[in-house]
Image (cartoon, rainbow, N blue to C red):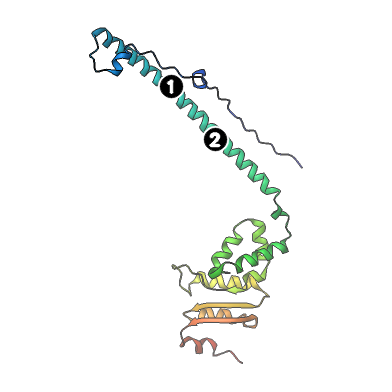
Amino acid sequence: MHAVTAAVTVTNVAFPHDVQGEFQLPSSPCPDLLITNSVPSDFQTNEIYKVILDAEEEGFSLDDEIAGMQRALDRLELQRAKLGDFVEAHRSVVSTIRRLPGEILGEIFSHYLDASASRAHSPEALSHLVGVCVRWRMIALASPMLWRHICPDIREDLSYDSPWEMQRIALQLQRSTPAALSISLHATSVNIIDLLLTESRRWQTLRLNTSPSIIPEAFNHVQG
């Protein structure tokens, strides 16, 4: 087995000595005027403007240093995030769940679906389960008991007898073979009932919400 290495460059950040040590403000040319309302002389006014300009230039210089430090901090945070992703990706490779036999995972899947309350064994819950990874999908597709509960897709944009719903039920009937079926569906035409009748020998429980006028047409060829 070949080892795969990933190089991550961490940028060294050197902080100015002024930031590390005590910051010194410029000397005021008129400290007494700061605590009184006296009017400065022309000379004092010129000195004040000069010290203001010097302080502003120093402030702009500090702004540049702050921006540089922020960019360096952003790079370090990005590198740290990449290292975290690298660690988590490799930690998942040696996780305990990867070592579980498929039979145990199948049992866990079944308990997960049973614990989904009103959405237990719903098409949405099954879709989430098989969409995690290739291995989980293969285990789920090879576990008929996960597919034995046939219930309606609760999405509002689908009619109960839509082609998509018919295809979904047919696929679930196939994947659930040879398990006994627990069926709870709405049927607004005989199409779904005809489809379910092809596997009537496997019915364990059946609950249909349908029109009374459909029942004779759907079951007229069923012999008791």
Relative image position of residue 81 (x, y in whole percent): 57, 39
| Residue under numbered circle 2 | 77
Quadrant where the N terminus is found in the figure: top right
The circle drawn on residue 62 is 1
If you read the primary sequence from the N terminus, does the residue marked by circle 2 or circle 1 appear first? 1
Q: Looking at the picture, tell me which residue is in the foreground, 177 or 62.
A: 62
Q: Residue at x 49, y 79 (%)?
A: 187
Please state if 55 lies on the left or on the right of 217 as rendered: left
Secondary structure of residue under mark 1: helix
Q: Nearer the viewer, mark 2 or mark 1?
A: 1
Of residues 88 and 208, the one nearer the viewer is: 88
Q: Quadrant of residue 150?
A: bottom right
Q: Is residue 133 above or below residue 202?
A: above
Where is residue 28 shown, x and y percent of the image?
35, 13
Q: Amino acid at mark 1?
A: Leu
| Residue appearing at x 72%, y 61% in the figure | 102
Dot 1, crowdedness within 10 Å: few (<14), some or many (≥20)?
A: few
- When asked about the image quadrant of residue 5, the answer is top right
Q: Hey, what amino acid is under mark 2?
A: Glu
Q: Position of residue 56 (x, y in %)?
A: 36, 19
